[in-house]
Amino acid sequence: MVLGFSSLCAALMQSLVIPLQPELPQLLDTPASNAAWVVTATLLAGGVAMPVAGRLADIYGRKPILVASAVIMLAGSIICALYSTIGPVLIGRILQGFAMGYIPVAISFVREVTPPAMRNSAVAGISATLGVGGALGLPIAAWIAQAFDWHMLFWLSAVLAAAMTVLSFLFLPQISPIDRGRFDFLGAVGLAVGIVGVLTGVSKGNDWGWTAPSTLISIIGGLVVLIGWGFFEAHHTHPLVDLRTTIRRPILLTNIAALLIGFGMMAQSIVVPQLLQMPESTGYGLGQTMLQAGLWMAPGGLMMLAFTPISSRLLSTLGGRSTLVLGALVIAAGYVFAVFLAGAPWMLMIATCIACAGVGIGYAAMPTLILENSPPPRQVPVSASMRSCARWEQPRQVP
């Protein structure tokens, strides 16, 4: 319960400021190009934090890293709540992104403390929070932004972070570290530089231009750094990520599937709000307000959560691979529905619910697939982190 609640709170950070984005330049007294980093910075920080948190959990234990992630989220939330200028708010959003390291460590924690009969359900529930948090965060944030001062968003996240910290500290059992090796600082820096480079180029490509030197340098430079990082990690005594484990065929294919299903989730979370909010005069827009659009999308997040116990039964009956395939087919069915029936908000809501149900099924299957293929115990947190990182690292262009 503690891990599920806390993982959901951490996942809410990804969509916390999306409803505010059109007003951010005015609220922060900064150009729109600078204000966009308030969203992008959290994406970048989350992509870096997940594998790093997994490795730190190997060395120092799961509980200290979970508590530290919650404290970092609390600090970031308070900074954002107290300031109205771009610099402090950007720092706060980066810290909130680092809190995303909570989720993959929580998944590995569940494997250690949950009885085998309940393991599939517990892992599926925590894994689903990454999608559920993003889906539910949009209407919640839209309502708060319209009804109160925008700083109230961050005071709410501060309260949630404080609850995460207290609950994690008091109720999670202490588990001994499984690897007392050294932390690979150089590997962490290399991974951070590579991920930030690639994701910055992809996230800002529309603004900078896809053929602009800044975009190409960012993407190509990031890829070069990641290639060099891979060679370095392969020959390191205590690597940040054991690439020999990560590139094993079942785990590699699962991570690729995570990336593709993540694209499926992000596509609907980007396109559907735009269709809902565009004026009816366009011929395809549905003329909804920001809050109405968020409410139409909220059932998708609830559907993802509702399918957690169903996914657990599917895993027990079909196994991880067949469940993952079924999830992908359900996502495809949701998009096919939207192609032919998108003339009213309720139609898009149904399509979103179908797609989100597929995402929930697929996300539940992925950690089970990795655990079924038995990575070395010391690499379970890192394996979970890399899968979560693959899901997280989608190019998120928000309307």
Image (tube, rainbow, N blue to C red):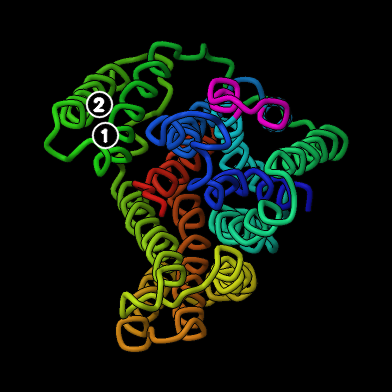
Q: Residue drawn 45% across and 62% down?
A: 269
The vertical placement of 391 against 169, above or below, is below
The vertical placement of 392 against 267, above or below, is above
Q: Where does label 2 land, which residue?
A: 222
SS class, disc 1: helix
Q: Residue drawn 64% across and 60% down?
A: 125
Image side of residue 391 versus residue 181, left or right: left
Q: Residue drawn 60% across and 74% down?
A: 299
The vertical placement of 64 against 129, above or below, is above
Q: Residue drawn 55% across and 63% down?
A: 290
Task: State the image quarter where residue 211 is shown.
Answer: top left
Look at the image and say whether residue 168 sits in the magenta stretch.
Answer: no
Is the residue under label 1 in contact with that under label 2 (CB below 8 Å)? yes
Please state which amino acid type lies under the numbered disc 1.
Gly
Q: Confirm whether residue 308 shows in the render.
A: no
Question: Which of the two residues, 94 or 284, is positioned nearer the viewer here?
Answer: 284
Measure the C-alpha gap from mark 2 to mark 1. 9 Å
In this view, which residue lies farthest toward the right?
Answer: 170
Question: Which of the two residues, 239 or 208, is positioned nearer the viewer here?
Answer: 208
Residue 336 at what x, y percent from top left? 32, 82
Task: Please rate how many residues cluster around mark 2, counting C-alpha atoms within 10 Å: few if below 14, some from 14 to 19, many from 20.
Answer: many
Name the magenta segment's main secondary structure. Answer: helix
Residue 322 at what x, y percent from top left? 40, 72
Of the image marks 2 and 1, the number of the one nearer the N terminus: 1
Which label belongs to residue 201? 1
Please state which amino acid type lies under the numbered disc 2.
Gly
Pick the quarter of the image with the C terminus.
bottom left
Image side of residue 250 versus residue 185, left or right: left
Look at the image and say whether residue 86 sits in the magenta stretch.
Answer: yes
